Image (cartoon, rainbow, N blue to C red):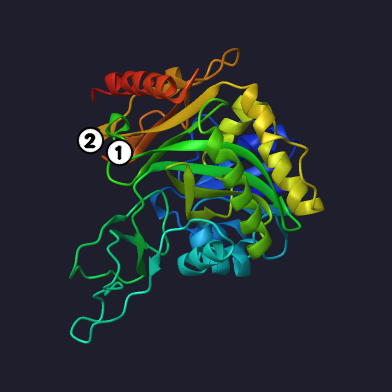
């Protein structure tokens, strides 16, 4: 089958689909140098948006389409992307419901799960964009964009701060950033990975609330989070009718996961599942979407037999013109350390991603330390250490 994938960065999903036997075309912002050899990659560069990618997709013949970040924020673009071919993923009506932060919070609370309070601001007549959270609440708040992604634009809210158009307030939960990914069909969920998230880590050129990687934990770490996180995934599937692969971002506080948002599409962390567990995530996605079949997969058992595995996005600390990046390409006979490799001579702006590094270890602290070491090699090679 001919499958078209579209999203901000689709190298990993496209490779997964190609390994699963599909004929793959990918549209994203990068068309990285290290594509799977059978993938046809097209880059929209700085012009990338879900709408632009969906428009470009209409010129490409295919049997099915699937999407990644940030199509979840543009249901109309999903509708256009799927025009005339099968959609392997959540349709626009599902996106509108599950990406509503107030509805998600209220739904999970009603089902007995922890979720941060979401404030629908009350306009002040003197300042129509000035939020007024519940005065009885002593919660700290974050300003978040409704069309959120990767932690961009998140910042603490202060009394009297103007709320930008298209934003909302979410209660700040002080804990560990985490996520769970799962395959969904027929109102059921099969969890396939539990992660700690790397957020705002200066070692990788990140700051604030910006996403910069994941660590797939193994048995012995985060064991108390597995069951409640899996149960939460099941409830989200039951309530919102998700299909295919999806993820939930969480904050874990005192062993309790608080659902922050649902990512109803391929997630960046999923390639770690393939590395650690030897499964085909896109194959699972296709089976769930096309045939409503769920994988025979036991996350608790998989965690007992695998290493901790991590990835970190390495962001440029200043504007840089890269030289010959062919030396970054992976050794076909070894587990690669670097992916999402820019083309030789690429111009990378400060704060933009240069590549992704990978590592494995016995536990998350050691895995992160190795990721930092490998990121430092990139910074040294580009004069940014």
Which mark is on residue 206? 1
Q: The N terminus lies in which quarter of the figure?
A: top right
- Closer to the camera in the image, 39 or 259: 259
Q: Of all residues shown, which one is farthest toward the bottom?
A: 125
Q: Where is residue 302 in the image (x, y as percent from the top left)?
A: 66, 28
Which residue has dot 2 on it? Answer: 318
Lateral position of residue 175 relative to residue 27, left or right = left
Image point 30% across, 38% down: which residue? Answer: 206
From this view, report whether residue 318 is shown above or below residue 179: above
Q: Is residue 46 above or below residue 308?
A: below
Of the residues under marks 1 and 2, which one precedes in the sequence?
1
Q: Look at 25% across and 34% down and name the residue there.
A: 317
The residue nearer to you, when weighing 350 against 55, is 350
Q: Which structural element holds mark 1?
A: loop
Residue 53 is tagged as none
Where does the image place residue 29, in percent across and percent down from the top left?
Answer: 46, 47
The quadrant the C terminus occupies is: top left
Viewer-nearest residue: 364 or 37: 364
């Amino acid at each position: 089958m001919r499958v078209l994938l579209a999203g901000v960065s689709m190298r990993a999903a496209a490779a997964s689909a190609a390994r699963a036997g599909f004929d793959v075309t990918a549209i994203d912002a990068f068309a990285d140098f290290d594509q799977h050899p059978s993938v046809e990659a097209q880059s929209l560069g700085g012009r990338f948006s879900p709408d632009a990618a969906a428009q470009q997709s209409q010129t490409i013949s295919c049997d099915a389409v699937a999407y990644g970040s940030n199509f979840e924020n543009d249901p109309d673009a999903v509708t256009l992307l799927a025009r005339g071919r099968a959609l392997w993923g959540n349709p626009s009506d599902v996106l509108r419901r599950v990406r509503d932060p107030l509805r998600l919070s209220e739904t999970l609370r009603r089902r007995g799960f922890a979720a941060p309070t979401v404030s629908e601001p009350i306009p002040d007549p003197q300042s129509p964009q000035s939020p007024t959270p519940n005065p009885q609440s002593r919660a700290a708040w974050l300003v978040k964009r409704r069309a959120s992604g990767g932690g961009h634009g998140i910042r603490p809210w202060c009394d009297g701060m103007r709320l930008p158009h298209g934003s909302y307030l979410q209660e700040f939960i002080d804990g560990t950033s985490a996520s769970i990914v799962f395959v969904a069909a027929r109102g059921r969920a099969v969890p396939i990975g539990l992660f700690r998230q790397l957020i705002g880590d200066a070692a990788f050129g990140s700051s604030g609330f910006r996403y910069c990687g994941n660590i797939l934990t193994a048995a012995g770490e985060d064991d108390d989070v597995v069951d409640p996180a899996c149960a939460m995934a099941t409830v989200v599937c039951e309530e919102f009718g998700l299909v295919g692969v999806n993820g939930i971002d969480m904050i874990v506080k005192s062993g309790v996961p608080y659902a922050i948002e649902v990512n109803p599409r391929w997630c960046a962390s999923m390639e770690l599942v393939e590395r650690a567990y030897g499964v085909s995530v896109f194959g699972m996605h296709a089976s769930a979407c096309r045939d409503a079949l769920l994988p025979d997969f036991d996350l608790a058992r998989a965690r007992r037999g695998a290493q901790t595995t991590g990835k970190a996005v390495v962001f440029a600390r200043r504007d840089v013109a890269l030289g010959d990046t062919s030396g970054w390409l992976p050794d076909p006979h070894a587990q690669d350390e670097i992916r999402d490799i820019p083309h030789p001579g690429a111009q990378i702006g400060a704060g933009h991603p240069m590549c992704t590094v990978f590592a494995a270890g016995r536990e998350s602290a050691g895995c992160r330390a190795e990721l930092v070491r490998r990121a430092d090699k990139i910074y040294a090679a580009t004069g940014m250490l």
